[in-house]
Image (cartoon, rainbow, N blue to C red):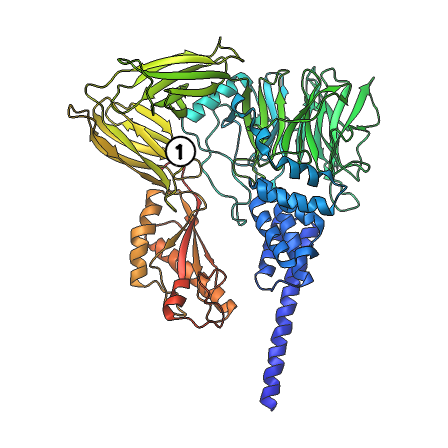
Amino acid sequence: MIKTRIGLSAFAFLIVLHTFAQNNKLKLANRNFENISYIEAIRNYEDYLRSVKKGTPEVKEALTKLAYCYRKVQDSRNAELTYADLISAYGNEVESEVYLYYAQALANNGKYKESQKMYSKYGQEQTADMRGRKFTVAYMDNSRFFEDSSTYKIDYLYALNSRQSDFSPMFYKNSLVFVSAREEGGIIKRVFMQNQTPFLDLFVFPDTTQLRKDNIAMKKAGAGAISTSSLGNLEKAEEEKEEKPLTKVEQFSKTLNSKYHEGPATFFKDYKRIIFTSNNRSKGKNRVASDGITKLKLYMASESNKGWGNIVDLPFNSNEYSCGHPALSPDDTKLYFVSDMPGGFGGTDIYVTEYRDGQWSSPVNLGREINTEGNEMFPFIDENGDMYFASDGHEGLGGLDIFHVELREGIPMSEVKNLGAPINSSKDDFGLITDASRSRGYFSSNRKRGYNDDNLYSFIHGCRQLNVLVYDNDTKKPIESVDVRILKDGLNKELIVTGPDGKVSICLEAGTDFEFKAMKEGYEPNSITYGTFATSLKNRTTITMYLQKSKTPPPIIKGTIVAEVNQVPIEGATVTLENEKDGSIETVVTGVDGKYEFQPKKEGDYSVTAIKDKYAVNTENLGKVKPTKKGPKSLEQNLGLVGEGDIFRLENIYYNYGQFFIRPDAAKELETKLVPLLKKYPEMRIEIRSHTDSRSSDAFNAKLSENRARAVVDYLLTRGIEIARIEAKGYGESELLNNCDNGAACSEAQHQANRRTEFKILSVAVSSR
């Protein structure tokens, strides 16, 4: 009896101890949440939720706040999954805003039909908020967002973008000023607690005429995407090889840039004065509002022979709300800016103030035509006095979209118009600047990787519509299934295939020279050069090409580029065929089917290389290839690419029950699969992920899986793989492949299936050569 009481007491003590530990985890998570340390809060909430059951108010609170954290750090994928879990577990108990945030996350991920349902649900519960109704109607048919997509050409700015966030460009003389979180060296690295990224500063690219040249040169050189997410797997920022810009990007002003945030700016037309966004600061120190958060203020500075100085804050700033994102009218008499001051319509609204004789008027809200229950921000006033701005409250493709409205004396004179794709995407698109006719300009977007990884893009609007007709030279009849490749500055821009009428249609930017190459098996390739300098913006121009049947057909080299992890064709991969003998190169970009094709005319030793952002480059040597009189010889070479985020299972890495030693059969799998991959790509970083079966306690299995993962790491170290390239993580029994969870009656083979090891690609090398 005494033994039983002691046993029950010990058991009760363990329950109390576990509950106490769980409560501490939740308290820590909530503390970081209140301190807006969202990255830390995410880790804390995930840790807490791994060991509790759904159904309690505490778990509901944790899920709600975790989803909100993902939303604040712009991780739409995990936000979607967490909101789905929350609604599934708690149904009608959730707050109505959960449906709004879930709808926004779904739209961010391009799931418009699912988003429409959630917007409809939100609209039924919050009838006063127009967003529910507007987005429900908009997503019934979102084709209107793509009507003008063929008239824009978008370019990623390799010459400007860095590993960190780069956004909000602004014209400055012949230069381009923008905001960046790039690090400028130094011993002390200061980061923003909300998302663990460096503080923002103003930078300048000195010559916009050189920008296009640098961008083309870096693109030709195969510059990879040089931006990263600060999140990755929420453990650390992914590491990538960064291309060194040809023209140095410099700090705009060390006087204006402080140790805190400096954000979007605008210049007076004489470029002698600037208005810029910065944290509320006094004598170099941050000032905190009564809610514990440092607000943003607008500051004005002037330039003298000694540089920028005489910094003053504008009179309508407040310590209790934020003002930022300034935009001056062409005559310098009106300043448009963003604020969350009391009395607005939503999160942040756009206001206007007049500047006369050195005095600022009281700000006026631009009204419901512009401002919504959501967030309006990043205004820009063009030479006509019209406004471009970003909003997540007007109907759009997801996140922030860019809109246009005609203004006269600060009053809207037209309906707000969404610029549509490709300026807008399902991610955040904002900070557009342009000329009066919107023929060209720049904007910001996080479409490349999501999260808070903003990048700068250029655009050209008003492309020229062209028809290309391909005929047989002898019969003068149209030829179907001809590959028509369009090149600009020696780089492949697009590959289109002719239809039964021998025609392809395309829209190309004006004022540019292009090369068209037509190729089909059994015909000699043909190419022509064509300039769009004099073509009409409204009327379609027709170009005619003729192909001659081949007498000695060149060999055909073809294949498919696939993802190694699932063998799915990869669209947008750049495939290069190189003649090692004379150094000549041909390049194509794969379509949705992942296929490529070349017809080399010269004899030589050839190699084929496939490149795509976030994938490791793969090169295969084809050996000697030469034309033959017997007809075209077909060489097929498929290439598999390994991409960041891919998870591969090591099929034969099994462990004896309760042990973590590498068995001989496991060593063989490592030697044939993982070690060669790591040696082929010496800059690749991976995570070893180990899983256990459900037998033994959760804590024991977590520790065992950690040991098993580290056992693989230790083995790889003996094969010469550097420790800096490998991370190890044990998942315990949290990701079982079958239903053999605690207490289930399963065979040894079923349990062994759960005892497995995988590896995940964290980052890849820019080049494998």
Which quadrant holds the N terminus?
bottom right
Left or right for 266, reference 236: right
Residue drawn where x is 31% and y is 29% of the image: 597
Residue 185 picture location, percent across and down: 55, 36
The answer to whether residue 246 is above or below residue 618 is above
Bin the neighbour count of mark 1 within 10 Å (Cα to Cα): few under 14, some 14-19, many 20 and up: many
Residue 115 picture location, percent across and down: 61, 43
Image-quadrant location for residue 690: bottom left
Residue 54 picture location, percent across and down: 62, 62
Q: Nearer the viewer, residue 444 or 738?
A: 738
- Identify the residue position indicated by label 1 in the image: 573
Q: Residue furthest top?
A: 534
Which quadrant holds the C terminus?
top left
Q: Residue furthest left?
A: 630
Residue drawn where x is 40% and y is 23% of the image: 491
Evaluate whether residue 241 shows in this view.
Answer: yes
Instruction: Tell me the SS state at disc 1.
Output: loop
Residue drawn where x is 35% and y is 33% of the image: 595
Image-quadrant location for residue 312: top right
The tally of labels here is: 1
Evaluate whether residue 260 shows in this view.
Answer: no
Image-quadrant location for residue 414: top right
Left or right for 210, reference 527: right
* Residue type indicated by callout 1: Ala
Residue 593 picture location, percent across and down: 38, 35
The answer to whether residue 365 is above or below residue 68 is above
The answer to whether residue 487 is above or below residue 686 is above
Left or right for 366, reference 615: right
